[in-house]
Amino acid sequence: MIKLSRLADYAVVLLTQMGSDAKGVHTAIGLAARTGLPVPTVSKVLATLARDGVVSSVRGAKGGYRLAATPERITVAQIIAAIDGPIALTQCVDRSADICTVETLCPSRAGWHKINEAVERALSEVSLAELMGTPAQFAAPARESHETTRTA
C-alpha cells in the first residue's frame, strides 16, 4: 500500500484550513482548535512547511503563519515533499545518498523510474485549491447536449 505519512496528511488538513482564508494569518493554536490536531503537532508541521517555503511566518503580537502562495499555486507534490522529502516509491528512485546494492542487476529499475515520474507529475498537477473543493474553474467541462430541437 502506498500511503502518505501521518504528518503529510496533517499538513494537507492544515493547509486546506488555511486556504479558506488564504491571505489571513493563522496561529498554531487556532488551527489546532479548528482541526482537532494537537498544538505541538500543528506547530511542528507549520515549522516544517515554513522551512520549505510553503507557508511563511509572521512575527509580532498578531503573528502566526500564512500561505506563501495562493491555494491555486501550491501543489500536493510541494506539500508532500516539504514534509516527507522527495517523492520516491522505491529505494532505487530515491535521490538520497544511499545506493541500492542490486541496482545494476535490477531489471525493473527503469520501470520504477517511469512510475515514480508519473506519480510525481500527477501530484504536481493537483493544487491545494482543488483539494479544498471544486470551484467552477476546476470543474470538468460541461457536456454538450446532442438533442435536437424540433420545430412545429
Image (tube, helix red, strand yellow):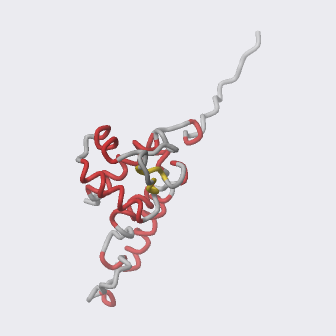
Q: Is residue 9 above or below residue 113?
A: above
Q: Quadrant of residue 120?
A: bottom left
- Quarter containing the C terminus: top right
The extreme top residue here reads 152
Which of the two residues, 151 or 139, is positioned nearer the viewer here?
A: 139
Q: What is the x, y in percent for residue 56?
A: 46, 57
Above-or-below relation of 152 to 92 = above
Residue at left offset 60%, top offset 34%: 143
Q: Residue at x 31, y 89 (%)?
A: 105
Asked where in the image residue 138 lies, by quadrant, the reply is top right
* Left or right: residue 108 compared with residue 78: left
Relative image position of residue 127 (x, y in whole percent)? 49, 51
> Which residue occupies 41% across, 68% down?
115
> Which residue ends up furthest to the front in the rendered image?
61
How many dots with numbers?
A: 0
- In the rendered image, residue 41, in percent from the top left (x then y), is placed at 25, 53
Q: Position of residue 20 (x, y in %)?
A: 46, 39
Q: Quadrant of the N terminus?
A: bottom left
Look at the picture and state if 47 lies above or below 98. above
Q: Residue at x 36, y 69 (%)?
A: 85
